[in-house]
Amino acid sequence: MTLAKERRRSVRVVCTESVEGVALNPGILFRGKMRDLSETGCYVVTRAVVRLEPGHVIELRFKIGKVEQRTLARVVQIMPPMGIRMEFVETGQGFSKLFRGFCHTQSLS
């Protein structure tokens, strides 16, 4: 992973972590690869077309290093053919600290 320069509110880390998403309404399960991650959101490339509209809330499961995370994220934009930009609306306690530590270890690599 490498750090990417960004104009966003937080640092964005380029990554290839596996991710699983569940949209409760409608009931959709998808899997894919996270292409970038920040404290405020992520970009995911899926294996199949995901038919969700911006605003849908999804539960995401992924790992930062070896620590499993579960977050709620809002779909910001569907990027055809198979990408999804998401903004985190709820993260677990300690997520920011874990993310900053992960960024530091990546910058040393």
Image (spheres, grey):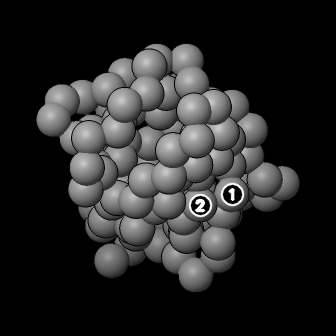
* Residue at the farthest top position: 54
Q: Amino acid at mark 1?
A: Arg
Rendered residue at 51%/38% (across/down) = 41
Across and down, in percent, residue 70 comes to 68, 57
Asked if labels 2 and 1 touch by Cβ distance under 8 angstroms, the answer is yes
Label 1 sits on a secondary structure element that is strand
* Location of the C terminus (image quadrant): bottom left
The secondary structure type at the circle numbered 2 is: strand
Towards the viewer: 30 or 96: 30
Residue 95 screen position, x and y as percent? 71, 55
Number of residues whose C-alpha sits closer than 10 Å to that of mark 2, classed few (under 14), some (14–19) or many (20 or more): some
Left/right placement of residue 34 relative to residue 72 reads left
Furthest residue in direction left, as rendered? 81
The one nearer the camera, 102 or 71, is 71
Q: Residue at x 44, y 42 (%)?
A: 42
Q: Classify 62 as above or below 8.
A: below
Q: x%, y% of residue 99?
A: 59, 58
Q: Amino acid at mark 2?
A: Arg
The vertical placement of 70 against 11, above or below, is below
Left or right of 103: which side holds 24? Answer: right
The residue that mark 2 highlights is 61
